[in-house]
């Protein structure tokens, strides 16, 4: 039988917990992601306000009014490394970007993106269902 002291056992447990903590990280969106998970960040959902108070609805008026707005959209596809900048129109509802319209009639709406809140500068990082990023900057 191998003899170990209590302090050795505690050190092993603490080391294991530390390593387990390294395997899970929090993204800038406040969602949990396991190490090695390169999929798009998950969208923050209900219940997040309990541990991210800055996401709570403070009752303030949205920075950008509801409706259709001109925007500069910086596109990035992490799978290919391709990026481009476009002048597009976006739909805003309750301070969230809900739809991105393309010139030839295409659009990204609720079937491809989740409503994303505009920050105080009128910008939002929107991710589609394929992990592509659209940095939206509404012209004010």
Image: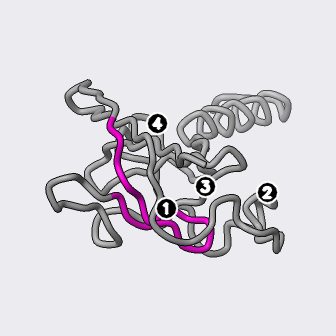
For label 1, count other residues whose C-alpha is less than 10 Å away and answer few (under 14), some (14-19) or many (20+): many
Write the residue at 45% across / 47% down.
71
What is the number of the mark on residue 54?
A: 2
Question: Label 4 belongs to which residue?
Answer: 35
> Secondary structure under badge 3?
loop
* Relative image position of residue 60 (x, y in whole percent): 81, 68
Report how far apart the C-alphas of labels 1 and 2 lie in the structure: 18 Å
Report how far apart the C-alphas of labels 1 and 4 lie in the structure: 29 Å
Write the residue at 69% across / 30% down.
15
In the visual, does 55 lie left or right of 97? Answer: right
Quarter-of-image position of residue 86: top left
Question: Label 1 belongs to which residue?
Answer: 97
- In this view, the mark in front (1 or 2): 1
The quadrant of the rendering that contains the N terminus is top right
Write the residue at 34% across / 48% down.
88
* Relative image position of residue 38 (x, y in whole percent): 36, 38
In the visual, does 2 lie left or right of 8? Answer: left
Q: Which residues are magenta?
A: 86-100
């Amino acid at each position: 039988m191998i003899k170990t002291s209590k302090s050795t056992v505690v050190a092993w447990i603490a080391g294991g917990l530390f390593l387990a903590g390294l395997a899970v990280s929090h993204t800038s969106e406040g969602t949990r992601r396991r190490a090695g998970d390169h999929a798009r960040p998950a969208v923050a959902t209900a219940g997040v306000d309990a541990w991210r108070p800055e996401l709570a609805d403070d009752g303030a008026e949205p920075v950008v009014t509801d409706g259709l707005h001109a925007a500069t959209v910086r596109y990035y596809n992490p799978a290919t490394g391709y990026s481009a900048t476009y002048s597009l129109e976006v739909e805003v509802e309750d301070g969230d970007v809900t739809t991105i319209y393309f010139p030839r009639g295409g659009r990204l709406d609720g079937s491809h993106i989740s409503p994303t809140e505009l920050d105080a500068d009128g910008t939002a990082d929107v991710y589609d269902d394929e992990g592509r990023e659209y940095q939206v900057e509404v012209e004010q």
